[in-house]
């Protein structure tokens, strides 16, 4: 059983990105999604990052809620 906390900082770690508050804020400021663009199809993900996001959403994994939060934040 996965006992890790599923929050934005840990999601960024899972994705291999810097996960401190400033780095996450910078990422959000530097990356946006178009209205009709799927999160996993964004050009700024590597293939493995996109696959992780897609799998999280498709399987409704423990990470799905925080991935959804990321999706919303990248559209603001």
Image (cartoon, rainbow, N blue to C red):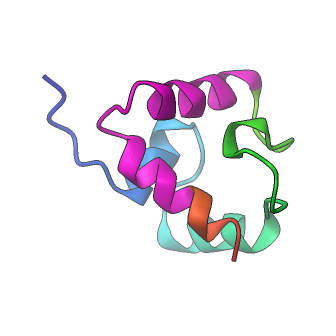
Quadrant into which the C terminus falls: bottom right
Up/down of 15 relative to 75, above or below: above
Q: Compare residues 46 and 59 and report the one nearer the observer.
A: 59
Q: Compare residues 70 and 28 and report the one nearer the observer.
A: 70
Up/down of 4 relative to 21, above or below: above
Which residues are the magenta region?
47-70
Residue 35: percent from left, percent from top: 81, 62
Could you tell me which residue is drawn at 42 percent across and 57 percent down? 9
Quadrant into which the N terminus falls: top left
Image quadrant assignment for residue 24 = bottom right
Image quadrant assignment for residue 4 = top left
**Does the magenta segment cover residue 69?**
yes
Image quadrant assignment for residue 8 = bottom left
Residue 68: percent from left, percent from top: 49, 54
Could you tell me which residue is drawn at 79 percent across and 64 percent down? 32
Residue 20: percent from left, percent from top: 48, 64
Up/down of 12 relative to 55, above or below: below
Q: How many marks?
A: 0
Q: Main secondary structure of the magenta part?
A: helix
Q: Compare residues 36 and 13 and report the one nearer the observer.
A: 36
Residue 54: percent from left, percent from top: 58, 29
């Amino acid at each position: 059983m996965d006992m890790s906390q599923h929050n934005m900082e840990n999601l960024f770690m899972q994705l291999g990105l810097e996960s401190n508050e400033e780095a996450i804020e910078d990422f959000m400021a530097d990356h946006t999604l178009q209205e009709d663009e799927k999160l996993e199809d964004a050009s700024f993900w590597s293939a493995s990052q996109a696959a992780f996001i897609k799998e999280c959403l498709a399987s409704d994994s423990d990470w799905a809620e925080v991935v959804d939060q990321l999706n919303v934040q990248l559209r603001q």
